[in-house]
Image: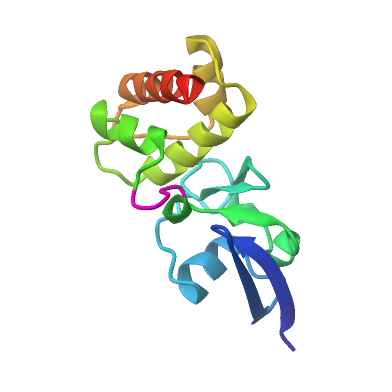
Amino acid sequence: MPDKISFKLNEKPVELAVDGDRTLLWVLRTDLGLTGTKFGCGEGYCGCCTILLNQRAARSCQLQVKDVAGKEVVTIEGLAKDGKLHPLQKAFMDHDGMQCGYCTPGMIMTGVGLLRLNLQPTEKQIVSGMEKNFCRCGAHVRIIAAIQQAAAELKGA
């Protein structure tokens, strides 16, 4: 029998009748059609499935949908506001912070989570905060530059 799960998704209330033990990743992708959150390893190591849960980066492949009941979830689709990209999304474009693009949503969501905790991260703090997100293409230097740009923009806002 399905569970009724209610939460806020990208600033909108959502109520689902689903098996509460299903992973949030697959509910987002298959039930809600939000395919920006990617499946990578399925074990919480790579970071492709990162979302924000109550403003903090979290691996959606490691969360059961019942874990987000009553909470706020933001996916990559929810970052832009009124047609305007989030400063980190724009910075990724400015610095060509993506190559194949598969890890990009998870990188951006982890970066946004990092910047919500620390608006003035040092390069060392950025590297440390991003080290658990994998990019096989080697765009790390450009990703760090993008986070630094977004931090400067957000600090000035």
* Magenta stretch: helix, strand or loop mostly: loop
Q: Residue at x 26, y 34 (%)?
A: 93
Visible in this render: residue 94?
yes
Left or right position of 130 against 149: right
Q: Quadrant of residue 120?
A: top right
Query: Is 105 rendered above or below residue 118?
Result: below
Q: Residue at x 51, y 35 (%)?
A: 112
Tell me if residue 81 is in the magenta stretch. Answer: yes
Q: Quadrant of the N terminus?
A: bottom right
Q: 80 or 71, which lies in front? A: 80
Visible in this render: residue 103?
no
Tell me if residue 26 is in the magenta stretch. Answer: no
Left or right position of 85 against 17: left
Left or right position of 64 against 104: right
Left or right position of 57 against 2: left
Q: Percent position (x, y) of residue 149?
A: 38, 20
Q: Residue at x 61, y 55 (%)?
A: 73
Q: Percent position (x, y) of residue 34?
A: 44, 64
Q: Percent position (x, y) of residue 45?
A: 55, 41
Q: 67 or 89, which lies in front? A: 89
Q: Residue at x 49, y 18 (%)?
A: 127
Q: Which residues fall within the magenta stretch?
A: 79-83
Q: 75 or 60, which lies in front? A: 75
Number of marks drawn: 0
